Image (spheres, rainbow, N blue to C red):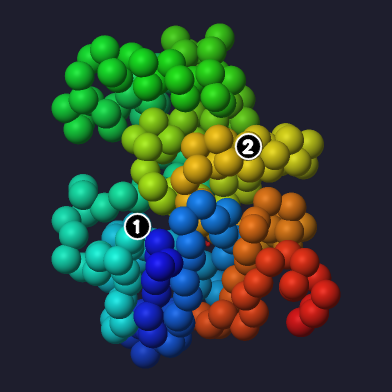
């Protein structure tokens, strides 16, 4: 069964339908990309998956459970924001540990899990620094580490490479693919960059005006362009 099931989702802002009768299944372990131009509804869809906003109508199932019936803190999902949203007064390691402390995880386990993700995103030498002492690429890694450390089954990434320069973007694409494969979790990524989606994603949904106009593997979409 699909890990994420969107059934006939409509999201209206006033009279405007940001998402218009959209249905989609995403399977466990996929690296799934939502691709489309600015304003087509990608972020709105991601925010609904995260439970930050509810559909006007339609149902969202996560692992077979209607998200409307699951309290937000129990949902197996985490979102990495485009803006990173780091705490400026906290060190890298405190930023990463914050969510686990909130959840009441034991100190020793927090230590072990923070160390593990710090290695994974190669932030070792920077754990005592604060965000203003980091480059943009390093801030992006902190944001990623902070999401990964909570071990969500589903990680939502809103333009995770959007703020990086070209060279770093290309390098980070492969790192994201490696991390997903290593942890076996499901990634849903939002991007407006077709090449980026083609490189990273196992499947892509091409969106336009709140609808999915095409969905398939990069090879399928490449053979049958719009
Ligand atoms: P994308 O992420 O693809 O750029 P969005 O999901 O941000 O698209 O937006 C889809 C449409 O919904 C746009 O027309 C946008 O202006 C509108 N929209 C998004 N969020 C809101 C909101 N909170 N209030 C009103 N309109 C919104
Ligand atoms: P993105 O393109 O990354 O989705 P946006 O600039 O579209 O970012 O949206 C940023 C925030 O503004 C979101 O919380 C969204 O809900 C809100 N927003 C977007 N479009 C509108 C709109 N037309 N009216 C009111 N709020 C909006």
Query: 4 above or below 146?
Result: below
Disc nearest the viewer among 1 and 2: 2
Q: Nearer the viewer, residue 138 or 217?
A: 217
Find residue 170 and report its image quarter: top right
Q: Which percent across, then down, holds residue 82? A: 51, 48
Regarding residue 173, the answer to whether it shows in the image is yes
Find residue 50 and report its image quarter: bottom left
Tell me the residue at 36%/16% (across/down).
112
Q: Which percent across, then down, holds residue 152? A: 37, 43
Residue that mark 2 sits on: 178
- Tell me: 173 left or right of 63: right
Regarding residue 130, the answer to whether it shows in the image is no
First reached walking from the N terminus: tag 1 or tag 2: 1
- Tell me: 55 left or right of 3: left
Q: Are marks 1 and 2 in contact (CB under 8 Å)?
A: no
Q: Residue furthest bottom?
A: 15
């Amino acid at each position: 069964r699909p890990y994420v099931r969107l059934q006939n989702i409509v999201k209206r802002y006033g009279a405007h339908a940001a998402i218009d009768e959209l249905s989609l299944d995403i399977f466990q372990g996929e690296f799934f990309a939502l691709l489309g131009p600015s304003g087509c509804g990608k972020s709105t869809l991601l925010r609904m998956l995260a439970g930050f906003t509810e559909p006007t109508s339609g149902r969202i199932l996560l692992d077979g459970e209607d998200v409307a019936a699951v309290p937000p803190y129990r949902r197996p999902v985490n979102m990495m924001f485009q803006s990173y949203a780091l705490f400026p007064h906290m060190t890298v390691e405190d930023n990463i540990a914050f969510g686990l402390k909130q959840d009441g995880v034991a100190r020793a386990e927090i230590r072990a899990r923070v160390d593990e993700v710090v290695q994974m995103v190669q932030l070792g030498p920077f754990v005592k620094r604060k965000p203003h002492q980091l480059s943009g690429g390093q801030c992006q890694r902190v944001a990623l580490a902070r999401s990964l450390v909570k071990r969500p089954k589903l990680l939502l990434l809103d333009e995770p490479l959007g703020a990086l320069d070209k060279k770093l973007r290309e390098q980070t694409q492969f790192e994201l693919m490696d991390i997903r494969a290593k942890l076996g979790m499901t990634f849903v990524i939002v991007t407006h960059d077709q090449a980026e989606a083609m490189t990273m994603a196992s499947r892509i949904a091409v969106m336009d005006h709140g609808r999915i106009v095409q969905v398939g593997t990069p090879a399928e979409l490449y053979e049958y362009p719009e």
